Image (cartoon, rainbow, N blue to C red):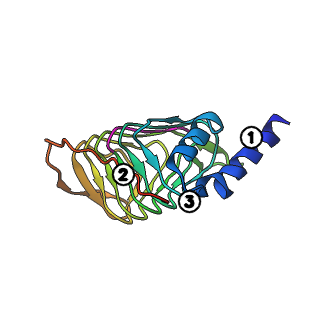
């Protein structure tokens, strides 16, 4: 019965609650029903879907934009002033391709402060993205990203460096988003 209720709440989140046009109401839902650690100044915009209850933490002034997918089964930690662009995907679970039984596994993802993840980027299970890094649109990140690195491609590879003196706030809460 507990499993059924948990799945029902997850369904309610991904079909109804994530479309409520109020940051305040969604934050209350995410904290109380989904069990997420959501900073008061952060924003999870409409249409963001989650694969599990619990296992999600978002720091001060961070934003997850519309229609992103957060696979929270293995745990996702977002630092402060993180920007996750629309339709980005963060995965924390997969299958072992060498397993005869198609065995699954879960590995958490940690994203440092001041990270910017571009449109349609995919972060694979077990990845850590260092402070200040940028993941280009459409990149697929399969291994750790060094602090302040700019990565692009499939699989993502370093293409540049970002300034170390970052001191901005990504606080972003548009009405009805």
| Residue 100 in view in this figure | no
Is residue 168 or residue 126 the one in the foreground? Answer: 168
Which residue does the image show at 34% across and 38% down from the upper left?
80
Question: Left or right: where does residue 145 sit relative to residue 37?
Answer: left
* Front position among marks 3 and 1: 3
Q: Is label 1 or label 2 in front?
A: 2
Quarter of image, res 29: top right
Dot 1 falls on a residue whose secondary structure is helix
In the rendered image, residue 48, in percent from the top left (x then y), is placed at 54, 55
Secondary structure of the residue carrying numbered label 2: loop
Q: Residue at x 60, y 36 (%)?
A: 54
Label 2: few (<14), some (14–19) or many (≥20) C-alpha neighbours in 10 Å: some
Residue for badge 1:
6
Note whether 138 is above or below 103 in the view shown: below
Where is mark 2, residue-wise? 172
- Residue 121: in sight, yes or no? yes
Classified by dominant secondary structure, the portion drawn in magenta counts as loop
Residue 31 place in picture, x, y as percent: 57, 35
Work out how far the residue at label 3 is from the one at label 1, CA to CA, in angstroms.
19 Å
Q: Earlier in the sequence, mark 3 or mark 1?
A: 1
Vertical placement of 143 versus 110: above or below?
A: below
Q: Are marks 2 and 3 in contact (CB under 8 Å)?
A: no
Choose between 164 and 173: the one closer to the eye: 173
Q: Earlier in the sequence, mark 2 or mark 3?
A: 3
User: In the image, is 18 to the left or to the right of 129?
Assistant: right
Cα separation, mark 1 vs mark 2, equals: 30 Å
Picture mark count: 3
Q: Which residue is mark 3?
A: 47
Over which residues does the magenta segment extend?
A: 73-81
* Residue 11 falls left or right of residue 72: right
Q: Along the polypeptide, which appears first: circle 1 or circle 2?
A: 1
């Amino acid at each position: 019965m507990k499993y059924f209720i948990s799945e029902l709440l997850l369904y309610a989140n991904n079909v109804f609650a994530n479309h409520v046009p109020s940051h305040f109401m969604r934050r209350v839902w995410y904290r109380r029903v989904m069990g997420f650690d959501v900073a008061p100044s952060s924003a999870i915009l409409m249409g963001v879907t989650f694969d599990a209850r619990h296992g999600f933490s978002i720091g001060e002034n961070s934003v997850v934009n519309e229609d992103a997918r957060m696979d929270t089964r293995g745990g996702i930690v977002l630092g402060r002033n993180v920007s996750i662009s629309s339709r980005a995907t963060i995965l924390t679970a997969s299958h072992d391709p060498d397993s005869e039984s198609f065995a699954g596994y879960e590995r958490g993802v940690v994203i440092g402060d001041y990270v910017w993840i571009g449109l349609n980027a995919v972060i694979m299970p077990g990845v850590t993205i260092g402070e200040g890094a940028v993941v280009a649109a459409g990149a697929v990140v399969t291994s750790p990203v060094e602090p302040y690195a700019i990565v692009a491609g499939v699989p993502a590879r370093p293409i540049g460096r970002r300034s170390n003196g970052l001191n901005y706030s990504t606080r972003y809460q548009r009405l009805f988003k």
